Amino acid sequence: MSYKYDPQLDGEIRPVSRPVLLQSLTAVIPAAAILHSEEQLKPYECDGLSAYRVTPMLVVLPETVEQTGAVLKVCHRLKVPVVARGAGTGLSGGALPLQQGVLLVLSKLNEILHIDLENRTAVVQPGVRNLAISEAVAPHGLYYAPDPSSQIACSIGGNVAENAGGVHCLKYGLTVHNILKLNMLTIEGELLTIGSDAFDTPGFDLPALVTGSEGMLGIIVEITVKLLPRPQAAKVLMGVFDDVQKAGNAVGAIIAGGILPAGLEMMDNLAIRAAEDFIQAGYPREAEAILLCELDGIAEDVDSGVEKVGGILRDAGATETRIARDENQRKLFWAGRKSAFPAVGRLYPDYYCMDGTIPRRQLAAVLHAMGELSAQYQLPIANVFHAGDGNLHPLILFDANKPGELEKAEALGGKILQLCIEAGGTITGEHGVGREKINHMCLQFNTEEIRQFHAVKRAFDREQLLNPGKNIPTLARCAEFGAMHVHNGELPFPELERF
Amino acid sequence: MEGDQDQSRLLQNQLQQALGEGRALRIAGGDSKRFYGNRVDGEILSTRQHRGIIAYEPSELVLTARAGTPLRDIEAAVAASGQMLGFEPPHFGAGATLGGAVASGLSGPRRAYSGALRDFVLGAKVLNGRGEILQFGGQVMKNVAGYDIARLMAGSLGCLGVILEVSLKLLPRPEAEQTLCFALNSRAAAAKANRLLTQAVPLSGACYSDGQLFIRLSGAGETLARCAQTLGGDGGDSDIWAAVKEQTGDFFSASDLPLWRLSVPPATDPAALSAAAAAATLWDWGGALHWIKTRLAADEMRAIAATAGGHATLFRSAQAPGDGVFQPLLPGLKKIHGNLKQAMDPHRLLNPGRMYADF
């Protein structure tokens, strides 16, 4: 697909004069907070999905919540679309700018405002980096649980927008489980507080709706996160397998065995070799798959759990199990996993990261089918999974400089997403729909469901000015995309006019 | 199971008919939580016969069932595989159903340690106010495709749609549980419960009633024995957890005074709350949930809760305040709520007024 905004498929955007917008904005925020020259705008043309690039009309970097509200009021008045961006590490093009829109960058709102040790919460601004929260509260024996691989760089506002996960979700949940309260600006510039410092709040569960809404409902300007006490002990085991299917079955056996691992990750041979070459984590290069299983909690429970998991892994056919002997080796085992993406990135000029999630029992079957697709498209796939929660990250390797390879990789990616839906899963577990998977939403949701999403969107943003063209496709787009996937000669959405 | 049936078409038909004739519907499962929320008048839309566990795979830690499935059937089914509902939902009656539990969004004593009902919702099939059957979320642990309308259904009191099916995440059942009891004043008890959270103790409950702090530990048998020894205290009656959850203890049955529910930040001083309300409180969730029986006016109770950073709900009472049982919303939020109602149930067909008068 073309990732460029298409007024026919994504909705008309009323043209606005750049000088008028610039003048209106200069009236409400310092000129230095507005970037408008070509070289200033260039660094903002893409987020973590660098294959998609659009130069925004203007970039605005407010330094206060008041400035942010003022910018929104101007944009609302002039009907200019607004795309929010945090650290720009997102992998689905959710912060891809619009040529006719303002890119609202929240990275300067980067203060930790308050740490409440008694209630174990922290109030932070959206530009605070994920890891910085855990670092700030570490002296008190606390941490913030969600840990996406990009946690060194990604910011908490983006984590909320994407409902970011990480390697510890199965036990500790996603972003939605680890935040209490959000301050959000509406597109009209009105400040709303949703959620509260208590465990629940009257009315509808708006924090649930807003978390993961990809900047489509409002602009998050303050977040109250939950902090957890650091577990007393953590140990990690590596299970080595000569067969991917056996590793997949071991995952189900661990869960069925009553164990709730803090992390349960799987890598296939291509990913293992890449990581080993990159960081020498001590992975067995010849293994077809490895499982990393981390247990945390009370020291004795962790010890007995490690023993139990070791038995389960061997019963499932592990050729070898290794327990990280100390904290250094535990970190090394994880370093290999956490660096898997850049490690695989060294093998090929480009990689395309997928994010489908499937029921765990389908793991072996989906892996097998993916292997067949890889052969069919003649593009290698390295597999790195959050196996515990069935979240796949197949990395499709390709060379964007070869004509047609990007398109081929995208087509293969689309097939993988379709596979995930057919297996009873979803097209995105944690990276978000963004611009990247906008068409695939039409595969997962029917017309009524997509209409319902749009109605919910209008409840917050009647004029559709927040991040248009992302997350939820128009029915026109689904009709267009669906036309490429005609089944039994029937066009989907027959009631819609064709372009 | 016997009696399992899919009545979604039937429910859809009844809703469409009501839609055509402009009649409001009162959604009911087991009707065990009818007392909760504001009074709704309307023709009953019963989800009770729409029942049955559709999918349960212990190795997935996920269960999918129809709304009318009795909660006790679900709890029994997952217990048989060594699993549980981590949010320990109150039943408030023998007929309590899954749909009612999700719509009310209420969680029991374990909530402070394992999470609330809304944390365990993975997906839902919903009949909206236009009579459309829609599916959101799914049966997998992670899913960020589209807005999380499934989770939004938790605690929405049927005001946004009829819940037809729900997929829930489950937790492994702890090997053993032990209840300890300490004679302490309320403030000291809350401080102790809070402190225990940062120690290596497998806490799964902390409630306070009538001069006694009850602590529940869940985990491996040996760990519990060791922790119990370190913590001291007396052995406590484990029935306290069911009594607090189902509101069957003396505190709840002793009088007919209106029962208030105050949800506040966990480190709130319970003695201050008690003094402000001039009444004893029974607290749960390590101090984040207070039950108070009093005749104080709604405005006063709401002010007490708001001062502490929380909110007050008139949970059980013969008479509701003029502005309803829930703490009123600020104008900005009220508008969004109205818009969401409009988006999901534009003709105000479903449980009108159950949560707030305007929707």
Image (cartoon, coloured by chain):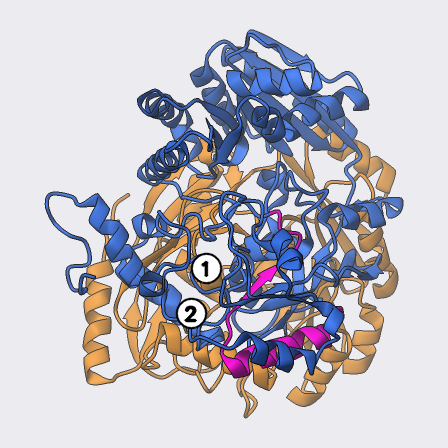
Chain colours: A blue, B orange
Q: Secondary structure at mark 1?
A: loop
Q: Is residue A255 above or below residue B14?
A: above
Residue A143 in sight from this viewpoint: yes
Q: Quadrant of the N terminus of chain B?
A: top left
Question: Secondary structure beneath disc 2?
Answer: helix
Q: Quadrant of the C terminus of chain B?
A: bottom left
Quadrant housing residue B112: bottom right
**At x 36% / y 68%, what residue is drawn?**
A11
Residue farthest toward the front in the current orientation of the protein: A38
Q: Is residue B309 above or below residue A327?
A: below
Residue sticking out furthest to the bottom:
B322
Image position, residue A294 (x, y; %): 66, 28
In the figure, is residue A429 to the left or right of A495?
Answer: right
Instruction: Residue A74 in the image: state x and y as whole percent.
Output: 59, 80
Q: Which residue is mark 2?
A: A456
Callout 1: few (<14), some (14-19), or many (20+) C-alpha neighbours within 10 Å?
Answer: many
